[in-house]
Image (cartoon, rainbow, N blue to C red):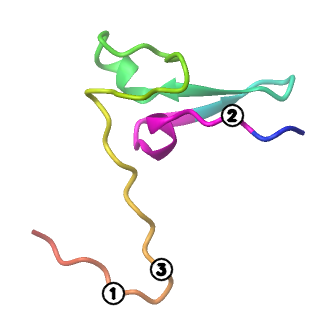
């Protein structure tokens, strides 16, 4: 299978949900589209700018102490 093309900002956004189909394609769904009609369900890729972009929280390294609440 060929590697998935880069989706731009979506690849680092917490609102991206990858949706595979039965033919092996993978689509980038914007979860913000469920609550805000200003965001397309399946944006044209690569996304270079987006007002709703929120970085994906980084997974903590095994054994690392959790961040204190702010």
- Work out which quarter of the rendered image holds the C terminus and state it: bottom left
Q: In this view, does 5 lie to the left or right of 63?
A: right
Q: Is mark 3 on a helix, strand or loop?
A: loop
CA gap, disc 1 and disc 3: 9 Å
Q: Which residue lies furthest to the front in this view?
A: 48
Q: Which mark is residue 33?
A: none
Q: What element carries label 2?
A: loop
Question: Badge 1: few (under 14), some or many (20 or more) residues near its Cα, within 10 Å?
Answer: few
The residue carrying mark 3 is: 61
Residue 41 spot, x, y in % from top left: 47, 16
- Work out which quarter of the rendered image holds the N terminus and state it: top right
CA gap, disc 2 and disc 3: 27 Å
Q: Which residue does the image show at 32% across and 35% down from the upper left?
A: 53
Q: Is mark 1 on a helix, strand or loop?
A: loop
Q: Is residue 26 left or right of residue 1?
A: left
CA gap, disc 2 and disc 1: 34 Å
Residue 13 spot, x, y in % from top left: 41, 42
Q: Is residue 6 within the magenta segment?
A: yes
Q: Which residue does the image show at 44% across and 37% down from the upper left?
A: 9
The residue carrying mark 1 is: 65
Residue 11 spot, x, y in % from top left: 52, 41
The residue carrying mark 2 is: 5
Question: Badge 3: few (under 14), some or many (20 or more) residues near its Cα, within 10 Å?
Answer: few
Q: Which residue does the image show at 55% across and 22% down from the upper left?
A: 45
Residue 5 spot, x, y in % from top left: 68, 34
Q: Give the range drawn in magenta.
A: 4-17
């Amino acid at each position: 299978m060929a590697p998935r093309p880069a989706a731009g900002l979506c690849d680092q956004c917490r609102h991206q949900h990858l949706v595979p189909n039965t033919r092996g394609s993978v689509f980038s769904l914007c979860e913000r589209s469920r609550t805000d009609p200003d965001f397309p369900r399946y944006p044209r890729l690569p996304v270079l700018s987006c007002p709703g972009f929120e970085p994906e929280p980084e997974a903590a390294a095994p054994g690392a102490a959790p961040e204190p609440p702010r």
